[in-house]
Image (cartoon, grey):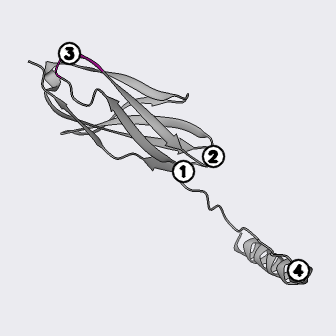
């Protein structure tokens, strides 16, 4: 495998040298320089005072198609996967009750067709249901 890569690099260097007299730039891309998806998590409502649902929606910017967005909750016991969405718009609803009083913390990750993943910032949602 290493010998094949070395031969490929030598061939690329030889071609670049041969073509450099063509009065144009020569670009030889080696490897993949794609960026991981950028994820922003939006939570509505931002504060909960009555039982019901909150909506988590992820806005994703990516160079490649997005294959999935996963929504997580951070708890005292660890990170919990809430759902995986494979279709845009990427969103889920979460049921909230008085037993959730305190601060809920959510984040999302997006994965593209190249296997690169990006993670949103954690969004905190105060819950105060009487």
Tag 2 and tag 1, C-beta contact below 8 Å: yes
Instruction: Indicate the quadrant where residue 126 lies.
Output: top left
Mark nearer the N terminus (2 vs 3):
3
Residue 9 in picture, x, y percent from top left:
76, 76
Callout 1: SS: loop
The residues tagged by marks 3 and 4 sit, at their Cα atoms, a distance apart of 69 Å
Callout 2: SS: loop
The residues tagged by marks 4 and 1 sit, at their Cα atoms, a distance apart of 37 Å
Q: Residues within 10 Å of mark 2 (few under 14, many from 20)?
A: some
Mark nearer the N terminus (2 vs 1):
2
Q: Quadrant of the N terminus?
A: bottom right
Residue 32 in picture, x, y percent from top left:
65, 61
Q: Which residue is mark 3?
A: 51
Q: Which residue is mark 4?
A: 23
Q: Residue at x 83, y 77 (%)?
A: 11
Instruction: Indicate the quadrant where residue 122 lies.
Output: top left
Q: Residue at x 77, y 71 (%)?
A: 27
The residues tagged by marks 2 and 4 sit, at their Cα atoms, a distance apart of 33 Å
Count of numbered marks = 4
Q: Which mark is residue 116?
A: 1
Q: Residue at x 56, y 56 (%)?
A: 35
Give the camera-side residue of 64 and 21.
21
Q: Residues within 10 Å of mark 1 (few under 14, many from 20)?
A: some
Q: Is residue 121 magenta?
A: no
Magenta-drawn segment: 49-53
Which one is closest to the eye, mark 3 or mark 4?
Answer: 4
Q: Which residue is mark 2?
A: 64
Magenta segment, prevailing SS (helix, strand or loop): loop
Tag 4 and tag 1, C-beta contact below 8 Å: no
Residue 129 drawn above or below residue 118: above
């Amino acid at each position: 495998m290493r010998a094949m890569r070395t031969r490929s690099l030598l061939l690329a260097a030889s071609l670049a040298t041969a073509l450099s007299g063509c009065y144009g730039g020569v670009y030889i891309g080696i490897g993949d320089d794609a960026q991981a998806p950028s994820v922003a998590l939006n939570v509505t409502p931002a504060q909960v005072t009555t039982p019901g649902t909150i909506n988590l929606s992820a806005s994703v910017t990516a160079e490649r198609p997005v294959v999935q967005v996963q929504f997580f909750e951070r708890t005292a016991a660890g990170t919990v996967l809430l759902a995986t969405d494979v279709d845009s718009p990427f969103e889920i609803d979460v049921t909230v009750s008085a037993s959730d009083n305190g601060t809920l913390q959510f984040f999302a990750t997006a994965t593209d067709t190249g296997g690169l993943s990006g993670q949103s910032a954690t969004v905190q949602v105060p819950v105060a249901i009487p």
